[in-house]
Amino acid sequence: QQQVKQSPQSLIVQKGGIPIINCAYENTAFDYFPWYQQFPGKGPALLIAIRPDVSEKKEGRFTISFNKSAKQFSLHIMDSQPGDSATYFCAASRGGSNYKLTFGKGTLLTVNP
Amino acid sequence: NAGVMQNPRHLVRRRGQEARLRCSPMKGHSHVYWYRQLPEEGLKFMVYLQKENIIDESGMPKERFSAEFPKEGPSILRIQQVVRGDSAAYFCASSKSQATYEQYFGPGTRLTVT
């Protein structure tokens, strides 16, 4: 049972392109949706996150779009750079007494110079 | 460095040995989550601890795995009688309080079972 489905599995873009990574969730109790960036041999780093009361959030070149009715959210990277090449994970959690994260399987992004 | 610290970064164990993984949360954080990352897979939740309490261990295998977060010192994930299937990267994350969504991850411990 995969509660958060992420696509595509891998993605190659040219420098300056706008890669888009998509996630879909099943549990309507989720109310926090972060994206993590992971470089080889490193731990995941929190990139940007959104709550379901907004449809879009921007931080620098990173934008999350959120569609509550479709139970989908996506990450857009504007003006992508080779340094953005990494694995990106979407995740979801619910509040209350336990904020454990349920992760997607990840997207390996390669930005060519 | 005020980030989450994990040690060792790499650990090699033979089948049947014990593995102990340590995690020191960020300063001011008292909540620790452990996740396991298998090759080509996302991270899977294992256990959530607060100081001296296990809050949720629903992701932990029933046998051989245990975790603790004592009043003093780091959180420890212990794997007894390791098998090759335990080979993975183990990450801990910390958060500030019970009502905080944001989790910050450590660099991980890469466990290899030979």
Image (cartoon, rainbow, N blue to C red):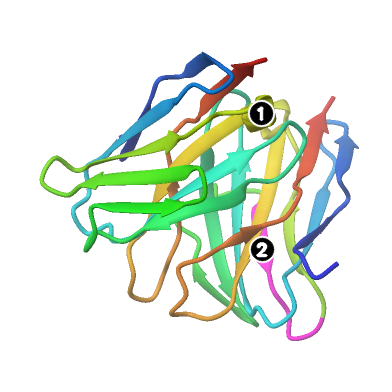
Query: Are the residues at dot 1 and dot 2 in contact (C-beta closer than 8 Å)?
Result: no
Q: Which residue is pictured at 39% across the width and 28% down the height?
A: A20
| Mark 1: amino acid | Gly
Horizontal and vertical percent position of residue B37? 61, 37
Magenta-span inclusion, residue B69: yes
Number of other residues with Cα within 10 Å of mark 1, as a class: few under 14, some 14 to 19, many 20 or more: few
User: Residue B57 lies in magenta, yes or no?
Assistant: no
Q: Could you tell me if residue A35 is visible in this image?
A: yes
Left or right: residue B5 versus residue A95 is right
Q: Tag 2's secondary structure? A: strand
Which is more toward the observer, B8 or B61?
B8
The quarter of the image holding the N terminus of chain B is bottom right
Q: Is B38 or B26 nearer to us in this picture?
A: B26
Please give the chain letter of the residue carrying mark 2: B
Quadrant containing the C terminus of chain B is top right
Along the viewing direction, whichever of A102 and A67 lies nearer the viewer: A67
Distance between the alpha carbons at the discs numbered 1 and 2: 19 Å
Q: Judging from the image, what secondary structure is the residue with disc 1 in?
A: helix
To the question of a shared chain for discs 1 and 2, the answer is yes
Crowding at label 2, few (<14), some or many (≥20) Cα neighbours within 10 Å? many
Q: Residue at x 58, y 78 (%)?
A: B96
| Region of the chain picked out in magenta, as a range | B65-72
Read off the residue under disc 2.
Answer: B67
Q: Which residue is mark 1?
A: B85
Q: Chain of mark 1?
A: B
Q: Residue at x 32, y 63 (%)?
A: A94
Kindly indicate the quadrant of the structure image that contains residue B106. Answer: bottom right
Q: At which x and y percent is residue A107? A: 50, 26
Q: Amino acid at mark 2?
A: Ala
